[in-house]
Image (cartoon, rainbow, N blue to C red):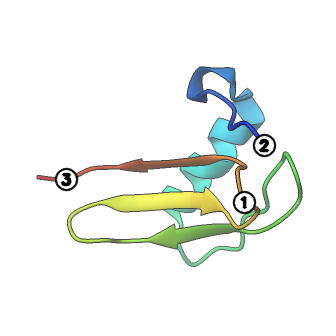
Amino acid sequence: MAVKAKIRDYTEAEWDALDEKMDYPDRVVLCPRCGNEIAYEEPGNSISVYCLTEDCIFGGLRGL
């Protein structure tokens, strides 16, 4: 079973890629960890950005 990395273990490049996708959702952003594309979704009042590779990097914002 794969173990997800803890958020605090992300590199600066990984955080930068997630931030870039949140700032520019239409831009193609590649994951610095595996090279797959990072996806952008707006479920409800939230924003979710994540690598399309299972158990890779992810992030987002939760709205009220």
**Residue closer to the observer: 16 or 51:** 51
**Kind of residue indicated by mark 3:** Gly
Q: Is 48 placed above or below 15 here? A: below
**Kind of residue indicated by mark 1:** Glu
Task: Specify which label sits upstream in the sequence, 3 or 2.
Answer: 2
Residue position marked by numbered label 1 in the rendering: 54
Which percent across, then down, holds residue 64? 11, 52
Residue drawn at point x = 73 percent, y = 36 percent: 3
Which percent across, then down, holds residue 51? 69, 60
Question: Closer to the camera: disc 3 or disc 2?
Answer: 2
Image side of residue 12 versus residue 23, left or right: right
Residue position marked by numbered label 2 in the rendering: 2
Q: Secondary structure at mark 2?
A: loop
Residue drawn at point x = 85 percent, y = 45 percent: 33
**Marks 2/1: CA distance?**
9 Å
**Residue closer to the observer: 9 or 2:** 2
Q: Residues within 10 Å of mark 3 (few under 14, many from 20)?
A: few
Image side of residue 62 versus residue 4, left or right: left
Q: Residue furthest top?
A: 8
**Marks 3/2: CA distance?**
30 Å
Task: Specify which label sits upstream in the sequence, 3 or 1.
Answer: 1
Residue position marked by numbered label 3 in the rendering: 63
